[in-house]
Amino acid sequence: MKFYNSDELSSLKNDVQIITEKVSVKDRDLYIKRAATIGRVTLLTRSFGRGTDFICRNQDLLAKGGIHVLQTFFSEELSEEYQIKGRSARQGDRGSYRMVLLNKDLEWILGSAWNEELKKIEVSHLYKVLNQARSKLYESKCGAKGLGIEQCKREHTKSKEFLRSLLEGEMKMIKTFLHEQNRGANLIPDCSRTVLLMDATSSMSSLLSAAKDTVCTMFERASAILEALKI
């Protein structure tokens, strides 16, 4: 809304329409149809970058190059970028695409020193550098998710064993499972307690969930070792 209310857009405001999640389905369909007409400017939230078909039937618009899409953020996943780019030319129609990025919005990918990092990058190589950095972050995120998946698999196996025990009436296994699942805090006076505080800047927020999964796995493994050693 900041751009919509800006002086830069004031001369075009009569031709501007906004599509957000708050717009009704009926109005949304109408706005999407209107978007593919000459002189129309449509502002959309990123959720409409996937699965929204802007079909251009206006021959004058197609003759002038078709729909032009401006993406104002750098996608965390390349697949989303491809989807947004695809809004410009549906069903083989002509169209064009470009990114317009705010430098400070790149902190999540370039880190807290984003301002200095940008100065080192040649304009002609900017997209290549950003794409490589995005790929590294994505690989790191996927690797961390793998730990969470393994944890879920272990819990799933335990749940299957519990169901089998219920069917076969193995009370010892049933009691052990329920005890583990419903065990409260260890209130032994001389026990050791660890408090872990996490803080993430905007550049690392996308990895916060993965960091939590990794810490949980670390404590689970440490606990198993201590229990085996009877410490």
Image (cartoon, rainbow, N blue to C red):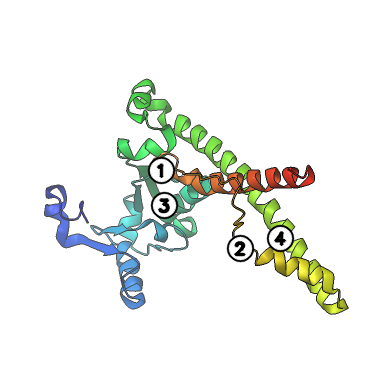
Are the residues flagged by discs 2 and 3 in contact, CB closer than 8 Å? no
Mark 1 or mark 4, which is nearer the start of the sequence? 1
Q: Gap between marks 4 and 2, in whole Å?
A: 18 Å
Q: Gap between marks 4 and 1, in whole Å?
A: 36 Å
Quick check: 210 left or right of 94?
right
Q: Which residue is mark 3?
A: 94
Q: Gap between marks 3 and 4, in whole Å?
A: 51 Å
Are the residues flagged by discs 3 and 1 in contact, CB closer than 8 Å? no
Q: Which mark is residue 74?
A: 1
Q: Gap between marks 2 and 1, in whole Å?
A: 44 Å
Where residue 36 appears, x then y in whole percent? Answer: 33, 62
Tag nearer the camera, 4 or 1: 4
Q: Which residue is mark 2?
A: 184
Q: Gap between marks 2 and 3, in whole Å?
A: 62 Å
Mark 3 or mark 2, which is nearer the start of the sequence? 3
Where residue 88 appears, x then y in whole percent? Answer: 40, 53
Q: Gap between marks 3 and 1, in whole Å?
A: 23 Å
- What amino acid is labelled 4 in the image? Glu
Q: Quadrant of the N terminus?
A: bottom left
Quick check: 210 left or right of 163?
left
36 or 8, nearer to the observer:
8
Tag nearer the camera, 2 or 1: 2
Q: Which mark is residue 155?
A: 4
Q: Residue at x 36, y 30 (%)?
A: 114
85 or 113, nearer to the observer:
113
Tag nearer the camera, 2 or 3: 2
Q: Residues within 10 Å of mark 3 (few under 14, many from 20)?
A: some
Are the residues flagged by discs 2 and 1 in contact, CB closer than 8 Å? no
Mark 2 or mark 4, which is nearer the start of the sequence? 4
